Image (tube, rainbow, N blue to C red):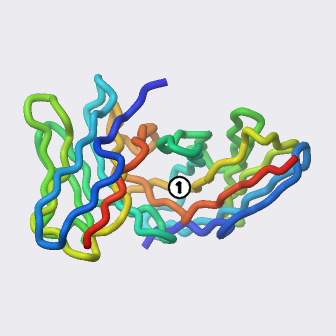
Amino acid sequence: GPKVLQIPSHQIIDMGQMVTLNCDPVSNHLYFYWYKQILGQQMEFLVNFYNGKVMEKSKLFKDQFSVERPDGSYFTLKIQPTALEDSAVYFCASSLYGGLSYEQYFGPGTRLTVL
Amino acid sequence: GDSVTQTEGQVTVSESKSLIINCTYSATSIAYPNLFWYVRYPGEGLQLLLKVITAGQKGSSRGFEATYNKETTSFHLQKASVQESDSAVYYCALSSTNSGTYQRFGTGTKLQVVP
């Protein structure tokens, strides 16, 4: 079936540095999402993105976070600067439509470790 | 707010035995949210296992089934006879108007099927 890819699979970074997480969504999908999962906790919504704009974001989506998808390339999540509490697995997802019942396709996640 | 509660931690089942993973939901913003079960196999992204968007109906896939019960606000996942290949982490999720187009997930239940 359709696959979402995430690069890298694991990133280790020093606190205060910038990190960019990359997502290659399903090719014809229009809606893109980032979720965050801290070890042992639920996967939590961060943000969704459509037509070049953030549509919705949660309170977890701090000012240090930003997303973009320039020219239909990777959908990226940038954190600048990083903090210790940003250590988590970040999952990207995409969907063709944005309605409540439409399936989201998820990537395998990027494990971010902030030291 | 909306939430999902599912069987926590790990469940170990012998091959060919039956399985039930409990899921209950709370949706304060909408009476009948859409309900989903996702599965994550080792090293892969979340995959949709089944979804039900109408209360009272049953969804099924790959031998798994779940019934949307609005009286008990439950969406338990069941399988009559598990196989080793079913070993994975299972997530119950809901979407509703309060959460917009994103989904709210349970903490995940790791299923270990042993010979």
Q: Is residue B108 left or right of residue B103?
A: right
Q: Which of B18/A99 is in front?
A: B18
Report the residue marked by disc 1.
Answer: B93
Find residue A13 and report its horizontal and vertical position in percent: 21, 63
Q: Which of A73/A113 is in front?
A: A113
Find residue B16 and report its horizontal and vertical position in percent: 90, 43
Find residue A41 and report its horizontal and vertical position in percent: 48, 70
As helix, strand or loop, the secondary structure at mark 1 comes to: strand
Q: In which quarter of the image is the N terminus of chain B?
A: bottom left
Find residue B24 and report its horizontal and vertical position in percent: 64, 66
Q: Residues within 10 Å of mark 1 (few under 14, many from 20)?
A: many
For the question of whether residue B98 can be seen, the reply is no
At horizontal 31% and vertical 68% (from top left) the residue drawn is: A87
Give the vertical position of A34 relative to B44 (above or below).
below
Q: In this view, does A109 lie to the left or right of A73?
A: right
Q: In which quarter of the image is residue A82?
A: bottom left
At horizontal 25% and vertical 32% (from top left) the residue drawn is: A30
> Could you tell me the amino acid type at mark 1?
Ala
At horizontal 84% and vertical 55% (from top left) the residue drawn is: B13
For the question of whether residue B107 can be seen, the reply is yes
Q: Quadrant of residue A88?
A: bottom left
At horizontal 51% and vertical 55% (from top left) the residue drawn is: B94
Question: Mark 1 falls within which chain?
Answer: B
